[in-house]
Amino acid sequence: MRLVFLGPPGVGKGTQAQRLVEQYSIRKMSTGDILRESVARQTPLGLQAKSFMDGGRLVPDQVVIGLVHEWLKGLARTQGYVLDGFPRTLVQAQALTRILDELKTPLHRVISFEVPETELIRRLTGRRSCPKCQWVYHLEFNPPRRPSRCDACGGALVQRDDDQEETVRKRLKVYQEETVPLLTYYDELKLLSRINGQGTIEEVSERLMEILKPFMGRR
Ligand code: AMP
C-alpha cells in the first residue's frame, strides 16, 4: 500500500500513520520529523530549514522534494509506505507524481483528514512529543502515564516551538493557501478519500481502515 496522508497540522495524521506502521509492515516518512531531527543535530539541512519552521512557513520545495526522492529511491519496490506531511504544495505533488512514474510505483490512495479549525488549535497547543523517539502525546486527549515523560523511552517531553498559538495560526493559514489545492489535484486523479478526523484515535482509525480495506496487501 502506497499512501499519502494530507491534512492541516494537528489533524492527527501523524498519529494514524504511527498506528499503521505498528500494525502492518509498512514504513512512514514524515518530512516534519526528518527536518526537526536535522535542526536538533544542526546539520546543513537543519540550519537551512530552521528559520522557515520556527516561523510556521514551508521549507523550500526543492529541499523537501530532494529528501523524499532519496528516501523513495532507497525503498524496495514492494515496500508499502505512508507519506505524512508531504506533499504540501502543488509543485511537491507534481514532483511526487513524476518520481513515482519513474519508479513505476503509483500511489494507491491519498487520505485527507478533516477537522474544524477551533478544534485544531486546541489539539496543537496541548501537544507534547518525545524528541528521542518522536512519540506524540496530548496533555488532554492522550496523556503520558508519568507527567512530562515518554511512556516508550522515559525521555523528557517537549512542546514544539511551532505549536505555540501564534505559529499554529500561521501554519493553518499556510495549509489553506498552499496545501488545500492538492485536494482538487488528487480528486481529479481519482485518488482522494476524505475522512472525518474528529473523535477518538480509535474511531478515526476505524474509519481509516474502512477506506484502506480494499487496498490492503497491494504491491
Ligand atoms: P509537520 O510536523 O509536518 O507539521 O512539519 C513541521 C514543519 O516542517 C512545517 O511547518 C514546515 O516548516 C516544515 N515541513 C514539513 N514538511 C514539509 C513539506 N512537505 N514542505 C515544506 N515544509 C515542510
Image (cartoon, rainbow, N blue to C red):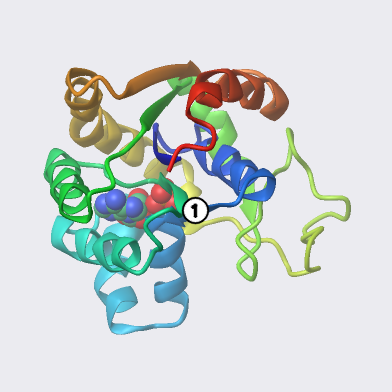
Tag 1 secondary structure: strand
Q: x, y percentage for residue 176?
A: 26, 28
Hey, which quadrant is residue 159 in on the image? bottom right
Q: Quadrant of the C terminus?
A: top left
> What residue is shown at x 67% (from left), y 49% (from top)?
22
Side (left or right) of 104 relative to 15: left
Question: Which amino acid type is shown beneath numbered disc 1?
Answer: Lys
Taking the image as drawn, is residue 89 in sight?
A: yes
Which residue is at 48% across, 29% downward? 215
- Give coordinates of residue 66: x percent, y percent: 21, 66
Q: Quadrant of residue 142?
A: top right
| Residue 168 against residue 58 in the figure, above or below | above
User: Is 196 rendered above or below residue 16?
Assistant: above
The residue carrying mark 1 is 28
Residue 118 percent location from the top left of the image: 49, 21
Q: Seen in the image, is 153 located left or right of residue 114?
A: right
Q: Residue at x 25, y 23 (%)?
A: 183
Query: Does residue 55 appear anywhere in the picture?
Result: no
| Location of the N terminus (image quadrant) | top left
**Which is more toward the observer, 140 or 68?**
68
Residue at image location 27% in from the left, 41% down from the top: 106
Q: Is residue 132 above or below residue 169?
A: below
Mark 1 Cα shell of 10 Å, populated few (<14), some (14-19), many (≥20): some
How many numbered marks does the figure carry?
1
Q: Is mark 1 within 8 Å of ligand 1?
A: no
Image side of residue 61 versus residue 112, left or right: left
The location of residue 30, given as percent across then percent down, is: 43, 54
